[in-house]
Image (spheres, rainbow, N blue to C red):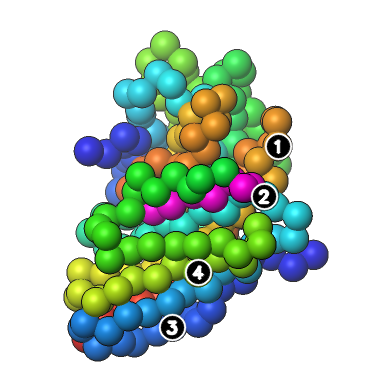
Amino acid sequence: GAGVSQSPSNKVTEKGKDVELRCDPISGHTALYWYRQSLGQGLEFLIYFQGNSAPDKSGLPSDRFSAERTGGSVSTLTIQRTQQEDSAVYLCASSLSSVGTYEQYFGPGTRLTVT
Amino acid sequence: QQQVKQSPQSLIVQKGGIPIINCAYENTAFDYFPWYQQFPGKGPALLIAIRPDVSEKKEGRFTISFNKSAKQFSLHIMDSQPGDSATYFCAAARVQTGANNLFFGTGTRLTVIP
């Protein structure tokens, strides 16, 4: 079946502009995660959605970052007033997240470059 | 603060060799330990995972060894092939508490020489 998809695959933006990154999880997966992969920081957790529960935003690096998940499926990560240090690959993962099932499946990522 | 420490940073082995990648953690609340493989330009792909109630798990040529008392776990790749050349990440999560977000190691770049 189809895996996790993300769009765009690449995004170049000017410092100070807002960007939106999209994630389509695997159909039927109730949990959705955003991670950031950068050269200096490795893979770091940003935010986690589970069903209709309030999201776990504990990994968001600043209030310029926000995310929403509409209808329990598609998610959008928004970065406002982008800075050069936001340049990274943004990865989305989804999971069934039922008892005994914890495997997270990653999308190909969106490479964000802030100039 | 790096919650999962991974070594080595890079590893070169001959085809057929058995590369070993090691990870260590401090938080005893972690109860799920997956390994991911990542090729350039791709997202991480789940290879194999282990829960702390077992000391070893094998899937194909990949084996996880888990030492709960030492808070360490490692990945062994048997009969390594050039196609195994990739970056490998260990990770940990607290799934029993519902906090399923993964804490990743810093990655090991593996090169298998033909």
Q: Chain of mark 4?
A: A
Q: Which sits earlier in the primary sequence, circle 1 or circle 2? A: 2
Q: Which sits earlier in the primary sequence, circle 4 or circle 2? A: 2
Classify A92 as above or below A81. Answer: above
Q: Which mark identifies residue A76?
A: 4
For disc 3, the marked residue is A10
Badge 1 local density, few (<14 within 10 Å), some, or many (20+)? few
Mark 1 to mark 3 CA distance (whole Å): 32 Å
Question: Mark 4: which amino acid?
Answer: Thr
For disc 1, the marked residue is A98
Assess whether mark 2 and mark 1 are in contact (beta carbons under 8 angstroms).
yes
Tell me the mark number nearer the camera, choosing from 1 and 3. Answer: 1
Mark 1 to mark 2 CA distance (whole Å): 8 Å
Q: Which sits earlier in the primary sequence, circle 1 or circle 3? A: 3
Classify A73 as above or below B59. Answer: below
Q: Residue at x 40, y 19 (%)?
A: B28
Q: Which residues are magenta?
A: A45-52
Q: Chain of mark 3?
A: A
Q: Position of residue A50 (x, y in %)?
A: 59, 46
Q: Which mark identifies residue A30?
A: 2
Q: Position of residue B21 (x, y in %)?
A: 42, 39
Tell me the mark number nearer the camera, choosing from 3 and 4. Answer: 4
Q: Position of residue B48 (x, y in %)?
A: 61, 41
Q: Residue at x 50, y 62 (%)?
A: A68
Quadrant of res A66: bottom left
